[in-house]
Amino acid sequence: MKCTWKRKQGWFLAILLAAVFVSAGCTGKADADLPVGAEGEVKQQEAGQTDAQADEDLSAEDETGREDQAEDVLLLAGRKKVVGVQPDGTADLLYEAGEGYYVQSAVYGDGIVFVAVYQEQNSESTDSGELERRLCAVEDGEETVLLDIDDTMSWALQMEYVDGSLIVEYVMEDYANFNNSSETKVIDFTKTSEGWQQGDRYQKLAELPGFAEGSIYANWKRALESLKSCGELITFDSEGNRLISYDTDGNLLWESALLQDTYDVDEVNSDYTVYSYTDYPEEDRYDLYDGSLILHDNRTGEEQTLFTWNEKSEDKRAIPLKLTEDKLYYYQSEEKQEEREVFDRKQIYSYELKTGEETFLYEAGRLAGPPMNTITAGVSGFDVYQGRYYFAAMEEDSIGWAVLSEDEIGKTPAGGKSYPGAYFSVWDEKRDFRQYGTVEGIKKTVISDSYDIDVYEYYQECFKLDPSYEQAERINETLKEIWEGDIRYAEDGAAQELSYLTGNDELDGYSRSMYPLSYDNELSRVEVLGADYLTVDYSGYEYTGGAHGYPYRSHYLFDLTTGEEKTLADLYQGSVEEFKDIVAQYSVQNWKDNPDPYFGWDSEDAAYADLYDNASLDMLMRYGTDGIVIEYSPYEYGPYASGYIGVEIPYEALNINL
């Protein structure tokens, strides 16, 4: 039996969606099947396919190493819903997160759905900290909490259901308090007649090469998936540059050394490893590099270069999505200057490991407007099941899954669509801003003529209120002026960066970094407050060099009856001193209730004095449904890792009636 696993897409994306294969026999599903198809109808099988052909397809899948295929379903986990796709293409709702909670990941076994959920992070009262994270078992509609996670720490979790037990590995790091210590735990849960029993039979493996401290977190995800599929715990030892396979007692089964030293391991199965290798031909010149995607034979140690690229051909970089026993699925990015409908297009391909044949499968991209960081359209959640391709996609008013059948491969989106195929509308993340208007975006990459490399890039969005609102024209004029100002700022930054380049390689070394400078600004929220006010929020990120960029936010309030832009000073009738006192009191209480995101003060009086002195009517704040939310920026009162610290102050406390 072949052993495969999927690549971890990154911690932030892993929080938002996942796609894994699970065993069937669900007992906790919803009463009604969810639709699949171009217009939302249920499809029992592919169009034009006979029952005999469907049976043949199942048999073909069995021959590729999937045992008991008819009993498998594809699990799709979005931010709110966990859905099981049956072999015939129909889908069942297995779990839906409660209000204010989102799904990080999910697995399935023996009729039980296991979900890791977290509390909404961007609520009006919380931006950092105060998050509830838990691991639950859901059976017959009943939810049992197996594990509560300390809300003061960063949390990375991997899990898989194997041989009647849920195996969970999680890492907790105390970023907020500048405490670099981390704790890795590997526990298991088994259901008995007395309920769920917790054990630690796999904890001993955490000290083995490939699992010990210093190894990448994705190793446990890979190891658990390989354990489920082929009974081996396959991991990667970064210090020894090798793949290692263990049995469940920690005994070494086999190992295979990679031939290159600088790499990222992307995909692995029992036969092959796919990894990226980057070579820097000149010392201390990270702007010059040659990249390769390499196929490593785990049995013979032989290697083959599949794709190459360099700093001038980044669009040729092949990024793996999934490795099966005979195919590698990967994507490449296409940059289009000032494209205003579909952005960040990705082209998805398959590569035959035996013959080297490449096949273009489809192209997909994202639409302007929130939520932007939720998915990489066409890539996130990618999986292949029963001859169909599943991936996350965006519609004008929602985010969901798309499904592409074999007879639709090779197509690009048409008519302004962001993806080909049918919309698999089982993901309920609505693009709420669409009820108020539309959004336009502009993306641009500035290239140095001297070196033919990207030196600056920006992406800017502008909300446009629907003309059905009486004062839409005036409000839209203001929003457009703000947008054009941001674009000018970006263009000035690009021109300045270009001016630093002299054409002298030695002098230009710093400016020619491998990461272009950037300035992005995206719509994050639109809402009508009360009957007369519209709030429009943007969030952005600027990278000016160094270890990381800096986030920023901007919030605007408009009077729908006049079209005028308003500030808190227009609404608040008290004195500045009274406002400063209110802000300081609420902020001190927030610090006392939730101290972890803050640097902290020596005393409550010191905290009050500091917060009072820095409060003002024009400080950063957003307008919520029930009150304003003061936003303290990173480094203002807490470390960068804390992000924005939000303090909600009810309108009632300010004598404001919206």
Image (tube, rainbow, N blue to C red):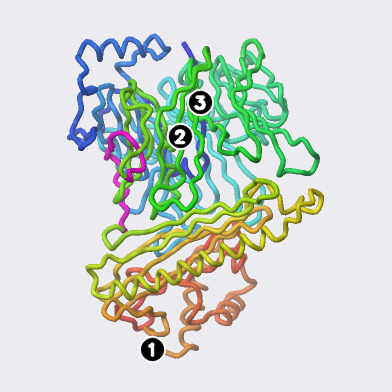
Q: Is residue 135 visible?
A: no
Q: According to the image, label 3 marks what residue? A: 224
Q: Is residue 653 above or below residue 35?
A: below
Q: Amino acid at mark 3?
A: Leu
Give the number of the disc on residue 195: none
Pointer 3 or 2: first along the chain: 3
Q: Amino acid at mark 1?
A: Gln
Does residue 86 show up magenta in the picture? no
Q: Residues within 10 Å of mark 1 (few under 14, many from 20)?
A: few
Q: Residues within 10 Å of mark 3 (few under 14, many from 20)?
A: many
Q: Are marks 3 and 2 in contact (CB under 8 Å)?
A: no
Q: Nearer the viewer, mark 1 or mark 2?
A: 2
State the residue at coordinates (29%, 68%). 528
Q: What stretch of residues is rendered in magenta?
A: 416-433
Q: Secondary structure at mark 3?
A: helix
Nearer to me, 25 or 426: 426
Rendering coords of residue 205 (x, y %) = 61, 26
Mark 3 and mark 2: Cα distance apart in space: 30 Å
Q: Is residue 327 above or below residue 194?
A: above
Mark 1 and mark 3: Cα distance apart in space: 60 Å
State the residue at coordinates (52%, 13%). 355
Nearer to me, 100 or 151: 100
Q: Amino acid at mark 2?
A: Gln
Q: Is residue 445 left or right of residue 432?
A: right
The quarter of the picture where residue 277 lies is: top right
Pointer 1 or 3: first along the chain: 3
